[in-house]
Amino acid sequence: RGSRFPLGLSLRLETPDVIVYDDLLARSSCHLNAIPSDCHLPDWRHLLRNPGKGLALMERLDEACWKVAHEQFWQDEVWRTRTFRDGAFSSVEDFRSQIYAGVNSVPSQFQVHLQYIVPTIHPVDYHHFLLGKRLVKDRWLSLEYVVGSLQVLIRCGGSLPEAHTMTTEAIFEAIRKFGGPCYEEAHSQAIRRYNRTHRACANWRPEHYEAEVHVRHPALRPELFGAAADSAGETTSALEVRPLPGSGVTSGLIASDLEKRDKVAIQSYGRPYTSDGKPQALSYYSFAKAPGEVLSADAWAVVGTAS
């Protein structure tokens, strides 16, 4: 175990050059990360140093995540019918096209990784998403944007050999000058698509929960008590937890505790749980590398070396 997080993996798929595992943050019941294990690229900027290899790498990670999402989740009828509304997707191909996939801008987690967030995201995360606190602009780069940028560089025979030294803003501008996508437009399109997908397929129902959380609107006049204008008690809290009818719960619920309980109940990370209901990530990578086997970013970026 590390100083902050466990070193074991909630492993989903492993090959000699890819690892796919459950994301500890678990924004949805299927939230995956995929990383390359044959090279060390601290962040996405290194992909731009060799666009051909960068594109091949992103396609490899995407295919690995899709294999997990399709075989271990989509084909599970119980998971699929509980997660999605009837008719949410016209086909498995339509389902794949609606997944929230992308990478983080810098700073990242010391290794480029594809985040693969299969809808629907948890209710509390959708609330934060609507407030602009999830998949944040200038931080979240959709897979469509990354792939589109690499494809443009390939078509025009260009690259950004010093991308790893450039600011994010400078990279966005350089990609535009090559004829690539506009980041702001690409991000807006991605966010609107994610929202349409969530609203169309989310299958969260009141009977799944014990309570609902009311969040005080910042413009609600201060004379009105609580998080909602119809609050009965004289509370100034920005959050108000109300037990749902039939839940058997009367009081004593705290929003932050509910969020933690929901996450443990819904997430796929660390399953099967321990006997006392705690996640356990006990997998370890089978294809351990010897010193020198993992390419450095500089070695990987050299044109002509194996991808």
Image (cartoon, grey):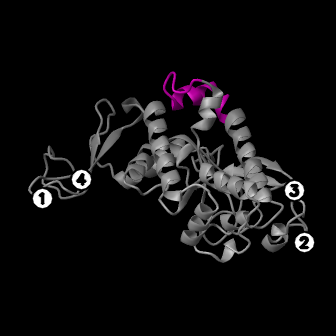
Marks 1 and 4 in Cβ contact (< 8 Å): no
Q: Residue furthest left?
A: 223
- Give amino acid for label 1: Pro
- Choose between 164 and 21: the one closer to the eye: 164
Q: CA distance from mark 1 to mark 3?
A: 59 Å
| Residue that mark 2 sits on | 292
Range of residues picked out in magenta: 73-90
SS of the residue at dot 4?
loop
SS of the residue at dot 3?
loop
N-terminal-most mark, 1 or 3: 1
User: Image check: 90 left or right of 272?
Assistant: left
| Residue that mark 3 sits on | 287
Marks 1 and 2 in Cβ contact (< 8 Å): no
Q: CA distance from mark 2 to mark 3?
A: 14 Å
N-terminal-most mark, 4 or 3: 4
Q: Which mark is residue 216?
A: 4
Q: Position of residue 68 (x, y in %)?
A: 71, 40
